[in-house]
Image: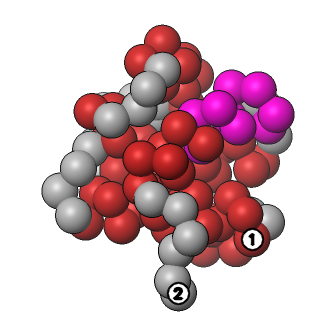
Amino acid sequence: MKLSITGPEAVDLAVHAINTTLYGTGGASVLARVLLHAYNAAEQPLNISDLCTLDSEKEEWAWAILKLRVDGVEPNTIVSDQAAFQLVVDKYWIEPST
C-alpha cells in the first residue's frame, strides 16, 4: 500500500477526526487505539482486525500513523494540537488490569 499522506499529516487528521467529526463513534475509538498504541504499545493494546472497520480514508491515516511509529517517531511528538492529543489520551486511555 502506497500512502498518499505523511505520518505527521495522519496524526493531525486522526486527532482532528477523533475530537470533532467522529467523537464517540466506532471509527473514533479505532483511531484512538492506533494513536495510543503508537504512543505506548506496552500499555495500550491494539486489535489489528479493528482496522477493518475503518473507511478507506481513515484506514490510510491509521497505517500512516503505524508506519511513522515503525520509523521511530511517536505521534505525541509531532501532533500540532497537543491539547487535542491530550483529550484523546484522557478519553481513550485504558488502565492496565491489576
Judged from this view, the residue extending furthest toward the left is 72
x%, y% of residue 72?
Answer: 17, 56
Residue drawn at 68 percent across, 26 percent down? 19
Q: Is residue 87 above or below residue 49?
A: above
Q: Is residue 57 left or right of residue 87?
A: right
Disc 2 residue type (three-letter): Met
Classify 3 as above or below 73: below
Q: Secondary structure at mark 1?
A: helix
- Residue position for label 2: 1
Q: Residue furthest bottom?
A: 1
Q: Identify the image quadrant of residue 59.
A: bottom right
Colour scheme of the rendered structure: secondary structure
Q: Which corner quadrant holds the C terminus?
A: top left
Q: List the residue tagged with mark 1.
A: 56
Disc 1: CA contacts within 10 A as few (<14), some (14-19) or many (>=20): few
Q: Earlier in the sequence, mark 1 or mark 2?
A: 2
Q: Is residue 28 above or below residue 62?
A: above
In this rendering, the answer to whether 10 lies above or below 92 is below
Magenta stretch containing residue 13, yes or no? no
- Report x, y in % for residue 37: 38, 49
Image: magenta residue range = 14-22
Image coordinates of residue 2 in percent, x first then y, are: 51, 83
Front position in the image: 7 or 49: 7
User: At x 60% / y 43%, what residue is drawn?
Assistant: 14
- Report the magenta stretch's main SS: helix
Residue at 44% x, 26% y: name it: 80
State the residue in front, 44 or 22: 22
Q: Seen in the image, is 15 located left or right of residue 46?
A: right
